[in-house]
Image: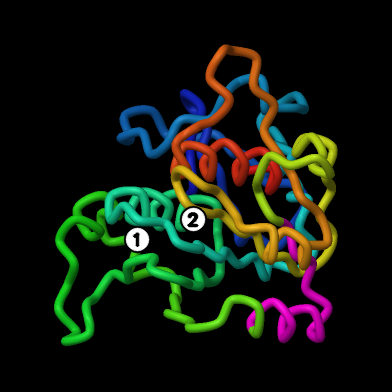
Amino acid sequence: MRVGFERNFVIESEFSEDEIEIHPRPWGENPIYPVKQSCLTGTGRTIKIKKQKSNIKDKRVCLILHNVRSNHNVGSIFRTADAVGVSKIFLSGYTPAPTDRFGREVKEISKTALGAEKNIEWEKIKNTNTLIKKLKKEKVLIIGVEQSKKSVDYKKIKINSPVVFIFGNEVNGLPKLILNKCDIVAEIPMKGKKESLNVSVSAGVFLFRILGV
């Protein structure tokens, strides 16, 4: 399967090996996707490129969006979640869903999600605490993304099991009732005068770093 090129090289991969072999391609063929030279190792006519391994052994990664008010934020998070390989998104509280109660598409969400809402499984739930209790029984690690007295720097967290990340309201964040049920509370350190980020921006920063994408 062709997945990329570096000048006169074509990458062939079935995505099952730790290394991808790159063979010369005939001059004149159209390029496919760029591969950074810094990723390449080896000499001669066959070059090997190391595939980066994710921190996640089990690919089950879910999100809970609790009381996220903005349709645009929800759509943006769906788009980011699709990019990093999230399996499912739970929508709790008054967080809007991609479709309304009549099954009609919510335009503000679809506009920012750009179709990602159709690629990721999602579920509207009534009781966040009941869901957390169920996930814990299934040995899922619960991580709340919030600033609190017991929060840790998100860069120090290593994930080796199924996990769910919880993001909260744009202004009030996550309530204490939910934070107290989390196995870990993680925060993104701030160096400026503002002590917060937009929730969709936080999700992007957090997920790409934690999941090693």
Identify which amino acid the numbered label 1 is placed on: Ala
Image coordinates of residue 73 in percent, x first then y, are 35, 49
Q: Which mark is residue 15?
A: none
Earlier residue among tags 2 and 1: 2
Q: Which residue reaches farthest top?
A: 192
Within 10 angstroms of label 1, few (less than 14), some, or many (20 or more) residues?
many
Give how far across and how far down residue 17 sits, in percent.
74, 57
Q: Is residue 142 magenta?
A: yes
The label on residue 81 is: 2
Which residues lie in the magenta part? Answer: 131-143
Vertical side of 1 occupied by 199: above or below = above
For the residue marked with disc 2, what is the amino acid? Ala
Q: Secondary structure at mark 1?
A: helix
Residue 23 at what x, y percent from top left?
Answer: 59, 39
For image coordinates 30% across by 35% down, the residue present is 30
Give the left or right position of residue 22, taking residue 72 as reference: right
Please provide percent x and percent y for residue 7.
Answer: 47, 23
Q: Are marks 2 and 1 in contact (CB under 8 Å)?
A: yes
Q: Secondary structure at mark 2?
A: helix
How many residues crowd around disc 2 within 10 Å: few (fewer than 14), some, or many (20 or more)?
Answer: many
Q: Residue 115 appears in which quarter of the rendering?
A: bottom left
Residue 188 part of the magenta segment: no
Nearest to the observer: residue 31 or residue 210? 210
Q: Name the residue: 78% across, 62% down.
A: 180
In which quadrant of the rendered view does residue 117 lie? Answer: bottom left
* Picture quarter with the C terminus: top right
- Residue assigned mark 1: 116
